[in-house]
Amino acid sequence: MQDQAPRKTLPKLDESLLAHLPPFSRLDRREIREILDQATSRRHDAGARLFNEGDPAERFYMLLDGHVRVVRVTPTGDQVTALHIPAGQLLGIARAIGRDTYPATAVTASEAISLGWPMHLWDIFVARYDGFATETYKTIGERIGEMNTRIVEMATQQVEQRVANAVLRLVSQSGRKVPNGIEIDFPITRQDLSELTATTLHTVSRLLSAWEKQGLVESKRKRITVCDPHALVLLSQS
Amino acid sequence: MQDQAPRKTLPKLDESLLAHLPPFSRLDRREIREILDQATSRRHDAGARLFNEGDPAERFYMLLDGHVRVVRVTPTGDQVTALHIPAGQLLGIARAIGRDTYPATAVTASEAISLGWPMHLWDIFVARYDGFATETYKTIGERIGEMNTRIVEMATQQVEQRVANAVLRLVSQSGRKVPNGIEIDFPITRQDLSELTATTLHTVSRLLSAWEKQGLVESKRKRITVCDPHALVLLSQS
DNA sequence: CGACGCTTTGACTGTCATCAACGGCCGTGG
DNA sequence: CCACGGCCGTTGATGACAGTCAAAGCGTCG
């Protein structure tokens, strides 16, 4: 694998990293310490792969910082982004859905930091830690909901509405307040957006240009700021 | 609800109904008896709804006979079919993914028979019966895979390929051997197929007509028979 | 400063949705 | 038994949306 950063076990990982995250929120310090002691932390460059579709699912991860795109590649080479995962969520949890290979590829959208555990700990975590299983299945439920929404959108909406929805979702998932509005807090290209919305980078570019002329958004290279979210919502529904 | 058939608890439900189905296959007669004794069996007319999107998830079901379409309806009234569920699978298992309302509506495609249990038994089943949880999560994993596949198909394939894929999937899921080929074993209209493939009934009709002229399929009212599966596979990949 | 990656814009084109009309099957009720 | 109405399917004409092709501008990084 070209992009594996070396794994380091940092003895000083702080309990506060995990304490407030849903899968671990019901645990006490001692339990969180146990979990951290078994974890491997890694830094990933932008564009690095945590794992590939079809690989044996040997580890599962908690994304501590950054963003990950979950991508599938077709036989013809087209990429389709299935999900966007923000910091604070588990990923690579194939075992939870009865799989022993990863169903998709995970690519970092920006520099990212992950904790990883060998998959054989999964069953132990589920059995031993209160709330871990419940919260995990909630996450899965939410992801199923997201996928469902995308299917419905792709089936019924025009490209403009889909792109508007995608931008709004990214903003609400990872928006950061800036002077002119709310900025999507990680680098994202027209190409990325087109893979999220099943269209082409050209069409996305045209749409963003048009929106910018109307004052709905501003965008620089790899950065998008939504200035008038309400107007975008209207667009996304027409 | 207009289409609730009366619930009957049939004392004579036979253990063999469940014994070979994955979620129950590791259980002994006594356990299966327990489970059956708590179940309510119901017959549903074609087009009946087992439950509606958004309803509180009060019961979960095992589909014993027939086929169910899992459908979402948009604010504008368009219907989109998210999944097709054949006999022998669990459905309405919102609790397994941490939800307390149903995420979609379940409509029978043909006459159907279900067993239903109150949702509060879910946690008990998971805790008490060996393999129940594991098999259930496998089912969820498969459904996630299916949804994923549909997203990728809708994002990258032409209508003709999508429809071909949908037909092939239905055939492999519920095909019945007949003299001229393999027939999809439940009634399905062009409209249904169009909701599965995000297109219109007109386009589906044109495609099926064209395929029929080429001898790939035969179709009567609500019935589709695939005569040359291999050719369809080729079509679905070009 | 050059090269590469990202973005923009214009012109053209094809697929597929839309509109419209009709034909046929099937169950129902007189 | 026949006539009717509703649902299902077919087919043609038209046009729009968005993909493809092509080319050039702009930022950033090495």
Image (tube, coloured by chain):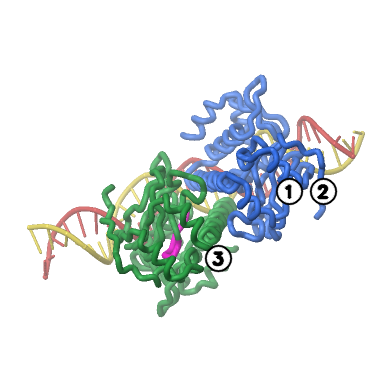
Chain colours: A blue, B green, C yellow, D red
Residue range corresponding to the magenta coloring: B83-89
> Residue beneath label 2, please?
A7
> Residue beneath label 1, please?
A116
**Quadrant of the image containing the N terminus of chain A:** bottom right
Looking at the rendered structure, the secondary structure element under dot 1 is strand
Mark pair 1, 3: CA separation: 42 Å
Looking at the rendered structure, the secondary structure element under dot 2 is loop
Name the front one of labels 3 and 2: 2
Judged left or right of residue A47, residue B16 is left
The amino acid type found where label 3 is placed reads: Leu
Mark pair 3, 2: CA separation: 46 Å
Q: For label 1, count other residues whose C-alpha is less than 10 Å away and answer few (under 14), some (14-19) or many (20+).
A: many
Q: For label 2, count other residues whose C-alpha is less than 10 Å away and answer few (under 14), some (14-19) or many (20+).
A: few
* Labelled disc at residue A225: none
Residue A3 at x, y percent in the picture: 81, 50
Kindly indicate whether the residue at mark 1 contacts the one at mark 2 (C-beta within 8 angstroms): yes
Mark pair 2, 1: CA separation: 9 Å
* Labelled disc at residue B235: 3
The residue depicted at 81 percent of the width and 38 percent of the height is A12
Judge if badges 3 and 2 mark residues of a common chain: no
Residue B237 at x, y percent in the picture: 59, 63
Q: Chain of mark 1?
A: A
The amino acid type found where label 2 is placed reads: Arg
Judged left or right of residue A54, residue A228 is left
Q: Chain of mark 3?
A: B
The residue depicted at 43 percent of the width and 48 percent of the height is B104
Please say whether residue A202 is one of the residues in the magenta stretch: no
Residue A235, visible in the rendered structure = yes
- The answer to which image quadrant residue A73 occupies is bottom right
